[in-house]
Image: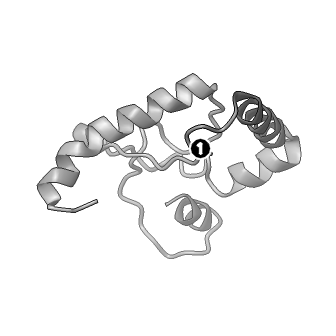
């Protein structure tokens, strides 16, 4: 979705955007309402990216990985490139990310069950 937002904002796609699924309007498409503003507040959905380590990974390794990735995303050139694609950068602590993923799983569980999908 973010690459479509970026392409549409740069005039590369002749697409009419009806709504964005996140909770806030995009700086790249400020004239496009959110799905909630369009009358569908329960359809909000966001993509997210994060790194998870396998269970049992030493805390020292996890902490180092978190530090290095957080620093990399904070670099102005990296941040600029990611934001140009429509990504919204929201750095999180390790506990915040764990809680976010758990909320996403809980929020989407009814839809996954209703779909009949098997994991």
Query: Is 3 placed above or below 35 here?
Result: below
Give the residue at x 78% y 45%.
Answer: 79
Against 101, residue 12 (above or below) is below
Tell me residue 74's x, y (percent).
81, 36
Question: Quick check: 55 above or below 3?
Answer: above
Residue at coordinates 61% horizontally, 53% vertically from top-left? 86
Residue matched to label 1: 52
- For the question of whether residue 39 can be seen, the reply is no
Point out the image quarter for the C terminus: bottom left
Q: Residue at 32% of width from left, 45% of height from top?
A: 35
Circle 1 crowding by C-alpha within 10 Å: few under 14, some 14–19, many from 20: few
Which color mode does the image show?
one colour
From this view, report whether residue 71 is shown above or below residue 27.
above
Residue 54 is situated, as x and y percent measured from the top left of the image, at 58, 45
Q: Is residue 55 left or right of residue 10?
A: left
Residue 90 located left or right of residue 69:
left
Query: Quick check: 58 left or right of 16?
Result: right
Question: Residue at horizontal 56%, vertical 23%?
Answer: 95
| Residue 11 in view, yes or no | yes
Q: Position of residue 110 (x, y in %)?
A: 18, 44
Q: Nearer the viewer, residue 104 or 43?
A: 104
Residue 67 spot, x, y in % from top left: 79, 32
Left or right, 103 with respect to 15, comes to left
88 or 30, which lies in front? 88
């Amino acid at each position: 979705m973010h690459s479509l937002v970026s392409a549409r904002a740069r005039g590369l796609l002749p697409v009419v955007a009806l709504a964005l699924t996140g909770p806030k309007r995009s700086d790249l498409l400020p004239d496009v309402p959110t799905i909630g503003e369009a009358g569908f507040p329960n359809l909000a959905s966001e993509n997210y990216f994060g790194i998870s380590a396998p269970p049992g990974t030493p805390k020292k390794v996890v902490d180092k990985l978190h530090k290095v990735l957080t620093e990399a995303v904070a670099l102005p050139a990296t941040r600029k490139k990611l934001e140009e694609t429509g990504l919204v950068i929201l750095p999180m602590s390790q506990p915040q990310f764990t809680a976010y993923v758990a909320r996403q799983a809980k929020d989407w569980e009814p839809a996954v069950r209703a779909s009949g999908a098997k994991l």
